[in-house]
Amino acid sequence: MVKKNYTAVTEFILLGLTDRAELQPVLFVVFLVIYLITAIGNVSMIWLIRSDSRLHTPMYFFLSHLSFVDLCYATNVTPQMLVNFLSKSKTISLTGCFIQFHFFIALVITDYYMLTVMAYDRYVAICKPLLYGSKMSRCVCISLVAISYIYGFANGLVQTILMLRLSFCGPNEINHFYCADPPLMVLACSDTYVKETAMFVVAGSNLTCSLTMILTSYIFIFTAILRIRSADGRRKAFSTCGSHLTAVTVFYGTLFCMYLRPPSEASVEQGKIIAVFYIFVSPMLNPLIYSLRNKDVKEAIRKVIQKKLINKIDILVTGI
């Protein structure tokens, strides 16, 4: 039921991870370090893929966009969070909150389908290697990435419009460290049924649809791998999928826990911890997962380091 004679909220207060003042500086340092590792790791991955011609393949093209999306949604949340750790006023404007909300939903859904596209790429590479060049042409790759972005941002826009239709009349304290669905709906003075239903439908359908496509791709992949007679051939085929499977497990596992629950005070508190994993831990780990478990990326990194060392030695010799 809509509450009448209310004063519209113009800003929100983000309560953050904890209200314990002594922990704020510690958390600031921890999340600053995590964000720097995330930014350096993902920017380095994008630069490495762009600069090394051996990595100019569909798999690494998709990986560069996954790194870009990871960097963007971590950046969407982290700066405001870091400021709030050291600030007494932990406010965010109504407009700023909904902008953050829109980009977060858009980028997370884009991430779903970027991971899905990467699974499809592995399916074609392993199950239909002779058709790989035609099925994963540059035009096809660009189209798949573009569709992921367009679909993600369209979903984000719809969810933001539905959130804007709600009335907020106080209290204005968001029990989270960013403007997320469940804690915002808890504060609404108007009926949240439509928005809550839309959240479950969009989150559930996109999670289920993308994960089903990924699992289906891997059923065919594993079937094809098991048909390979040599143990070395099976090992090499599995190694090309290991990094992607690890990234999928971390990302989807936390998102299922986050969104497929009704919004309540208890679910919001649990959601804060879960959100840390997919906003901060997953984007930080992805570059490490793909670099440590991938021979091509490790070789590209080795070449860059060797080139830097040779250049330094040349400068020293020239100086002498």
Image (cartoon, rainbow, N blue to C red):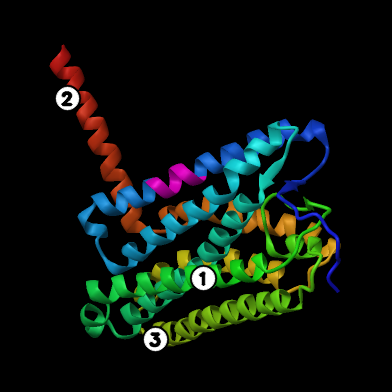
| Residue ID at (77%, 35%) | 23
* Numbered disc in front, either 1 or 2: 1
According to the image, label 2 marks what residue? 314
| Residue ID at (73%, 55%) | 273
Q: Residue furthest front?
A: 5
Amino acid at dot 2: Asp
C-alpha span from label 1 to label 2: 46 Å
Is 41 part of what is drawn in magenta?
yes
Whole-percent x, y for residue 265 in the image: 85, 61
Q: Which of marks 1 and 3 precedes in the sequence?
A: 1
Which quarter of the picture shows residue 257? bottom right
As helix, strand or loop, the secondary structure at mark 3 comes to: helix
Image disc number at residue 224: 3
Specify the principal SS of the magenta part. helix
Q: Residue furthest left?
A: 318
The span shown in magenta is 38-43
C-alpha span from label 3 to label 1: 25 Å
According to the image, label 1 marks what residue? 112
As helix, strand or loop, the secondary structure at mark 1 comes to: helix
Q: Which of marks 2 and 1 precedes in the sequence?
A: 1
As helix, strand or loop, the secondary structure at mark 2 comes to: helix
Q: Residues within 10 Å of mark 3 (few under 14, many from 20)?
A: some
C-alpha span from label 3 to label 2: 49 Å
Whole-percent x, y for residue 48 in the image: 31, 49
| Residue ID at (66%, 35%) | 28
Whole-percent x, y for residue 125 in the image: 31, 78
Q: Nearer the viewer, residue 20 or 5?
A: 5
Q: Is residue 114 above or below residue 174?
A: below
